[in-house]
Image (cartoon, helix red, strand yellow):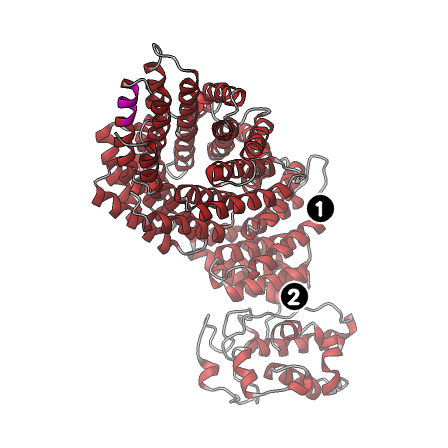
Amino acid sequence: MADLGEIWEQAKRFQDRRVVELASQAIRRRSEIESLVGAAEALRLLVAAKLALLEDAIEVARAGLHSSALRTDARADALRLLALAEAVRGSSGAERQYSEAIAAAEKAFLFFMDHGDERHQVDASVALSHLHLLRGESGDLHLATQAAERAVASAGAWRVENGRQRGQALLARAHAAHATAQGDRRGAHAHEDELALRWADEALELAQELGDAPLEVEVRSSMAQWSARRSDAAATLLQAKEALDLLQELGASSHRQIALTRLAADAAVQLKDPQQGVRLCQQLVRLCRVEKAEVPGVFAALQLLRTLVAAQRWEEAKTTGHEILSFCQQKEDLLCEAQVLRLLLEAYRKSSASEMLSTWQRSLELVPLVPQVSTAVELLTEVLQASAPLKRPLEALPCAMQLQALAPMEVKAPLLMAMGSALFEGGALEECCRVAQDSARLAEELGDEGLSARALALVANAQVKLGKFSAARQNARRARRRFGEIGDHEEDVRMRLLVAKACLCQDERGRKQPKDAVREAQEAAKLAKELDEKNSELVVSSLVTLVEVLSEAQEWEKCQNASIELLRQYPEKEAFALFHAAKAQQKLGQAHLAKTYLERVSELAARDVASRSLLEEAQEMLAALGEISSRPQQDENAYPGRCLHCGAASCSCAKQQRGGHNGDGMLRPGPAMRKGFLTSTMLREEDEHLKQRIQELANILLALPSPEDVSLEVPLSELGLTSGAAVLLRDELQREVKHIRLPPTLFLDHPTIRAVLGYITGQVR
């Protein structure tokens, strides 16, 4: 008959199957010889091994309690109660049994305290502390802390005979401290996190001195979990890999490595190293196949699927997902199937939404059948998110309405957010606002600033559609602040754009806020440029909104400059940019330029469906402008992006004949420089002839090759500029307009030409 010490030595080397075998024999034989206390101790070892093997430990513990019904021994009964508490503590999906387990642990604790059994008293207190944290009801955090403190006091100073108990007591106290810090939204107990790390470090040092590998793995696993909750991916990866290395060194089976592999893989993805996460998961999958471990293999494959989705390796994710799905359906494992379907839906939604209809339909059918509420809610949340690209936004809402009443708080907030999005897509805007506001409130209570910000953004967008512009501005600004705090700058930009649009609209009190609109749009455009250049969609959106806002606010000079910038960077927006530039030029008294731009807008809109909406208004503006005097030949088609020599949108005239002149001594027109055109604000009416001459010369400037090319040929640092265009204008003005004198050192200070060269002084240096 195996001694309990021998079984414990097998447990320290993670030989869980051997422990199950030896402990089962010990229970049977010790029960036969009436050694009930020994049988109860062996039962605890058996429960721990079953938990590690992902097998049902609760039923084993209950069977132990029932078997002792006819033969009573108070100490053995207390140990069996403790075994039940430990089985519930370590089992996933045992939420409904937490209260029963707490009662069992309390009863065991009282017995050990009455009989002065400090060692088992510590074990019972540790189990109580963890169970209270798991249950998480009102007052449980305080009770968990009390139980952990009792455990530390009972363990006393470190001694070899109770070293393991002290390490577990310190770890329990660390868990309670970490939970206190996490649950305190005001930050009054932020120091508890530091205490948690200090106690965990002490427990880790103790485990290493004792050579207690299971305790060291438990401590490192806890530290990795805490780091993951703090979004400290580097610390998570470090602790998880250290624990994995220890397990692999001692030859631990695959089931021991599942949780740690998940932590390490998720951290690797956060650190922008998804390949490392995939590699860790694939290594675990191979180990499961070698061991022929079916259940751990499913868990490992699920984690591989999660990591592939996080790494955006969609095709591999779909292949892996359908392989696991086939296995789950064969085994009729609805819980596993729900998890796989959720991940598959995400992969389809983000890659090829048109292919996911059958997966979406099966997911919707499965939701009411999933035995675990939180998993059902997570699946339904993904179903709701996938319903928009499938053009079925409202089909899943009846099921969501029923399930949200049962959903735990941590998954209810995302569910409400998904419901709000579906209602928004379905046009139920009032209901969308109500549901999204509930989601924002719950997310704020949970400390999820990202979800809270997204929910407020959804509310703001719905309120804009409802015409509630004052409320929309308020919620968009709240969302913008939160996006800024969490570092989501793209959403920050989008909220600024939404605020800008809402400020231009007449709110419930009949007011507009054009100055605020301009400020928000300008800041959004600035931030968008500072972000990753690959996100051109956001930059385009910000520039388009800026042009619209400046036009609506009647800030015409800024409007035309923003139009220039939009046209220069994104020629595909030519019609839009020229249309608003034309409006600006008309208001600035440049009717001939406005007409030229509008003619080009009409030409583009006639053949471009995307620009068709501008056609009618452009034609109305052209009719209002009427006939204007013809312009000099070099001014025809004068707008950014068009060659003045041949009239083409782009050509190589100037590049082929750079530096040459035509018969009248003027510079040959080249490809137009897309960086700007004339802004005129300061000339008196009596200087109209000078204004016209400046306009003509500015048109010549616009026909020059790109300023970068010119600056390489004609460096003019003594003027404060490096543009050949600048000196051309200076020379022409001095020769043709006799009363103007422009000393080189004062060139930039002359008020008359500052408007002409505004686009050069700011952009070509």
Residue sitting farthest toward the top: 70
Residues packed near mark 2 inside 10 Å, few (<14), some (14 to 19) or many (20 plus) = some
Which residue is disc 2 drawn over? 590
The secondary structure type at the circle numbered 2 is loop
Q: Main secondary structure of the magenta part?
A: helix
Does residue 29 show up magenta in the picture? yes
The circle drawn on residue 513 is 1
Q: Nearer the viewer, residue 667 or 171?
A: 171
Image vertical order of residue 717 relative to residue 7, above or below: below
- Mark 1, Cα crowd under 10 Å, few <14 / some 14-19 / many 20+, is some
Left/right placement of residue 270 relative to residue 283 reads right
Residue 282 located left or right of residue 171: left
**In contact (CB < 8 Å): disc 1 and disc 2:** no
Is residue 35 shown above or below 756?
A: above
* Residue range corresponding to the magenta coloring: 26-31
Q: Which percent across, then down, holds residue 325?
A: 26, 36
Q: Which mark is residue 448?
A: none
Q: Quadrant of the N terminus?
A: top left
Residue type at the position of mark 2? Gln
